[in-house]
Amino acid sequence: MAEKGMNRNAQRSRRLLKEAFMELLAEKPYESITVSDVARKADLNRGTFYAHFDNVDDLMRSVMADTADTISEFLSQAVESGFLEDPLPVLTQVGEYLDQNRELTRKLVESRSIESFVFALESRFREWVQQRIPVNTQQEKKACAMLTDYIAGGVLQTYRSWLVGDYPGVEIAEVNKYLSEFVRTTGKVLPELREGK
């Protein structure tokens, strides 16, 4: 359901339900959140919930889509060329978003029920990286596909590890600094791959 076509009350209700759901995610496991929990937290009735979402899974999908859209928007606003030469501006935007929404994004990546979210986010990021690497031959296309899988998988797994606390005491700026160096170094391999070395 597109929010742009809704009246203000409907938009407000959806926003309140999403905010309540995100607050609940910080308090308890996703699997134990009920429609009643969300409606109560949003100070709305169950009927209002069902006017906008089929169930808690539907609400979760909507929240995940919002998160993925926000990150995709950062990517689309990023400088169109030179990601491999200077990935820091893009990584900084994505990292800051994850940091500001750390509790939500940590819950999203921890929950087994939403592996599809992580997969969708990785697919979007992989596609975005691939669009920024020019390819001319079949050999370059193969090399580019492998390189983008490597970069997207590595970047997102590093963020995931940071979110769940695998790097205690490390701030997101430091994570981005390292990732930026890793991506730049990896990007230097592409010319050799193109030449078939």
Image (spheres, rainbow, N blue to C red):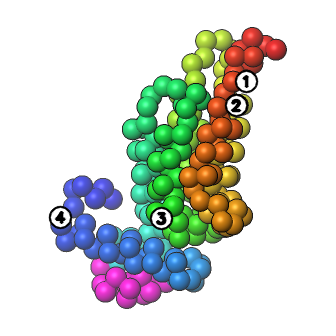
Q: Secondary structure at mark 3?
A: loop
Q: Verify CB contact (< 8 Å) between mark 4 and mark 3.
A: no
Q: Verify CB contact (< 8 Å) between mark 4 and mark 2.
A: no
Tally the numbered discs. 4
Q: Amino acid at mark 2?
A: Thr
Numbered circle sitting on residue 185: 2
Which residue position holds label 4? 7
Distance (Cα) linking label 4 and label 2: 50 Å
The answer to whether residue 16 is above or below residue 181 is: below
| 38 part of magenta stretch | yes
Distance (Cα) linking label 2 and label 3: 29 Å
Distance (Cα) linking label 4 and label 1: 52 Å
Q: Can residue 139 be spotted in the picture?
A: no
Q: Amino acid at mark 1?
A: Val
Which residue position holds label 3? 101
Residue 97 in percent (x, y) is at 46, 56
Identify the residue shown where x is 42% and y is 51%. Answer: 70
- Check disc 3: other Cα within 10 Å, few if <14, some if 14-19, many if 20+: few
**Range shown magenta:** 34-48
Which residue position holds label 1? 189
Q: Verify CB contact (< 8 Å) between mark 3 and mark 1.
A: no
- Of residue 49 and residue 67, the one placed in the foreground of this image is 67
Identify the residue shown where x is 69% and y is 24%. Answer: 188
Q: Nearer the viewer, mark 2 or mark 1?
A: 2
Q: Nearer the viewer, mark 2 or mark 3?
A: 2
- Check disc 1: other Cα within 10 Å, few if <14, some if 14-19, many if 20+: few
In the picture, the quarter occupied by the N terminus is bottom left
Q: Can residue 172 be spotted in the picture?
A: yes
Q: Earlier in the sequence, mark 3 or mark 1?
A: 3
* Dominant secondary structure, magenta: helix
Q: Nearer the viewer, mark 4 or mark 1?
A: 1
